[in-house]
């Protein structure tokens, strides 16, 4: 896909704060970019929520309102459907293969189609129901042991392992904890996120990758290559193990499926590995972070906790000792809690950057080809123009006449975009939500929860990487 050259226009760029030579607006972006960008948009942005920044030498369009997001993700979706290149991203994605970081084009379309058709559509997600219930049961058993002794549980670690085990079972057909690979798996995800996150030299000054032999970004490339080599060895081993039994059961997991379709789709081994890495990395943190933030908010809002406990505990038949997925259908408050958590705490507060493929006009403004695009879904979810008591945790805002209604998070309502919208919307939404709802319902059904002795509050301070997490681990005592 080629980026067109500039065209003559009389329309101005979206408004911009004052900037400094060489660094542009980088000094205005703090440790929590989603917070800094909202503050800048409130002061300098247009009425429509658009703002132009210069991050290093990279022109960047920031969309911080419902109207702006709709313009970028719907009205001009095709124009903004590609991803910018970066040294670390290119290395970790096998030269921009796969789904998440691939440029817009036929290769990306094919990879996305394979993932949706054979792993992430509603019917495939439903087929993993038994696996989800088994993994939830394992977590509940571990918590029961802590409850018996009054011991605090590291919920951050427990929930992270649960979501990674679920992804591994769907993608590779087994949990990595059996072979002790779960620790390495978690390290690779964390290291990859750190390399891809934030505004590093490579992202701010793309020309440095080639200038003077790329000396200034060589360190970042070297780190990325080391992480990539570890990913590559792990995925290679998985593929080799699957290939030896390919003809026994070609549809038991995603890797088997990719290998069975390799010849039909003309997939190279690197293309398969890039898709698999995407599924592992993208599918793990989203669900775990939402679960952790949901539990933290419920501890902070005991009325909401009591309401949810009453709903969950009164929704199943007498004598049933666990919550199954069939029981979730009528749990309106549970679904409202998940929606409210996604509104206040989207796992990726800034959607992965896009880049404009051609010049385009958005309302009265001009956006040149090659402009990087950031959509601040965190700011949109907390916009007081769209939400009453926008900073408050109020799940009941989504309940009307006893049903979950109103604004949805599946990409059609631009007030709530935790998974994005349009062509580059996260395809794993069904997979993530199924795991979140089942685990949260069981946590609330089986246990009462309190803070550890000597702890009187939960610190909600955030840390920004590729996703946003709480700075402190969530430790709770089950009862």
Image: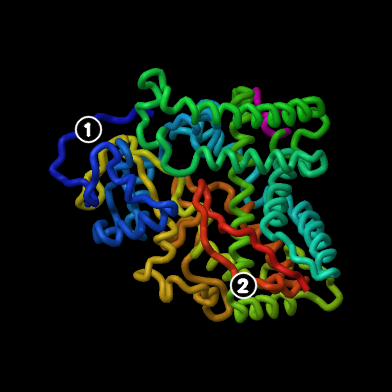
In the image, 459 versus 4, the foreground residue is 459
Q: Which mark is residue 298?
A: 2
Q: Earlier in the sequence, mark 1 or mark 2?
A: 1
Residue at horizontal 70%, vertical 80%?
310
Q: In the displayed structure, does residue 273 sit left or right of residue 84?
A: right
x and y, in percent, of residue 198 in the image = 45, 44
Looking at the image, is 222 positioned above or below residue 433? above
- State the extent of the magenta-drawn residues as a range: 256-263
Looking at the image, is 64 positioned above or below residue 210? below
262 drawn magenta = yes
Residue furthest to the front: 454
Q: Which mark is residue 182?
A: none
Residue at horizontal 62%, vertical 36%?
277
Quadrant of the image occupied by residue 143: bottom right
Residue 331 can be seen in this image: yes
x and y, in percent, of residue 194 in the image = 54, 41
In the image, 426 versus 163, the foreground residue is 163
Quadrant of the image occupied by residue 294: bottom right
Number of residues whose C-alpha sits closer than 10 Å to that of mark 1, classed few (under 14), some (14–19) or many (20 or more)? few
Residue at horizontal 38%, vertical 21%?
210
Viewport quadrant of the N terminus: top left
**Residues at discs 1 and 2 in contact (Cβ within 8 Å):** no
Report helix, strand or loop for mark 1.
loop
In the picture of the structure, the residue carrying the numbered disc 1 is 6
Looking at the image, is 263 positioned above or below residue 399? above
x and y, in percent, of residue 466 in the image = 51, 46
Viewport quadrant of the C terminus: bottom right
Q: In the displayed structure, does residue 109 sit left or right of residue 131?
A: left
């Amino acid at each position: 896909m080629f980026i067109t050259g500039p065209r003559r226009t009389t329309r101005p760029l979206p408004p911009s704060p004052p900037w400094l030579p060489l660094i542009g607006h980088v000094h205005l972006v703090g440790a929590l970019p989603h917070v800094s960008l909202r503050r800048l948009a409130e002061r300098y942005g247009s009425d429509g929520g658009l703002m132009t920044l210069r991050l290093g030498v990279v022109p960047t369009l920031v969309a911080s309102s419902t109207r702006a997001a709709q313009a970028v993700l719907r009205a001009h979706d095709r124009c903004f459907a590609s991803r910018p290149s970066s040294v670390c991203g290119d290395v970790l994605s096998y030269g921009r293969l796969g789904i998440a970081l691939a440029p817009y084009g036929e290769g990306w379309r094919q990879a996305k189609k394979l993932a949706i058709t054979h792993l992430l559509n509603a019917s495939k997600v439903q087929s993993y129901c038994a696996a989800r219930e088994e993994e939830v049961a394992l977590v509940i058993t571990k918590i029961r042991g802590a409850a018996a002794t009054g011991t605090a549980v590291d919920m951050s670690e427990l929930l992270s392992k649960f979501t990674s085990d679920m992804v591994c079972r769907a993608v590779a057909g087994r949990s990595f904890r059996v072979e002790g690979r779960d620790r390495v798996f978690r390290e690779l995800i964390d290291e990859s996120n750190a390399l891809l996150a934030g505004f590093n030299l490579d992202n701010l000054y793309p020309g440095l990758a080639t200038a003077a032999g790329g000396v200034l970004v060589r360190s970042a490339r070297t780190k990325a290559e080391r992480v990539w080599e570890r990913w590559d060895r792990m995925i290679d081993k998985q593929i080799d193990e699957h290939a030896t039994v390919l003809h026994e059961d070609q549809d038991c997991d995603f890797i088997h499926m990719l290998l069975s379709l390799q010849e039909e789709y003309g997939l190279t081994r690197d293309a398969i590995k890039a898709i698999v890495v995407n599924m592992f990395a993208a599918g793990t943190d989203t669900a775990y972070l939402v679960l952790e933030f949901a539990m933290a908010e419920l501890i902070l809002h005991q009325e909401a906790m009591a309401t949810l406990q009453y709903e969950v505990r009164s929704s199943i038949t007498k004598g049933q000792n666990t919550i199954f997925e069939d029981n979730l259908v009528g749990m309106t408050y549970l679904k409202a809690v998940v929606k409210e958590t996604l509104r206040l705490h989207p796992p990726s507060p800034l959607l992965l950057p896009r880049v404009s493929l051609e010049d385009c006009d958005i309302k009265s403004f001009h956006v040149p080809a090659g402009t990087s695009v950031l959509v601040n879904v965190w700011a949109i979810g907390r916009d007081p123009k769209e939400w009453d008591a926008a900073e408050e945790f109020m799940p009941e805002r989504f309940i009307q006449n006893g049903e979950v209604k109103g604004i949805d998070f599946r990409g059609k309502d631009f007030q709530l975009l935790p998974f994005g919208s349009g062509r580059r919307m996260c395809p794993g939404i069904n997979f993530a939500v199924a795991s979140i709802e089942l685990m949260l319902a069981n946590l609330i059904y089986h246990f009462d929860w309190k803070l550890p002795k000597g702890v009187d509050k939960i610190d909600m301070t955030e840390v920004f990487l590729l996703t946003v997490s709480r700075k402190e681990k969530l430790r709770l005592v089950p009862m």
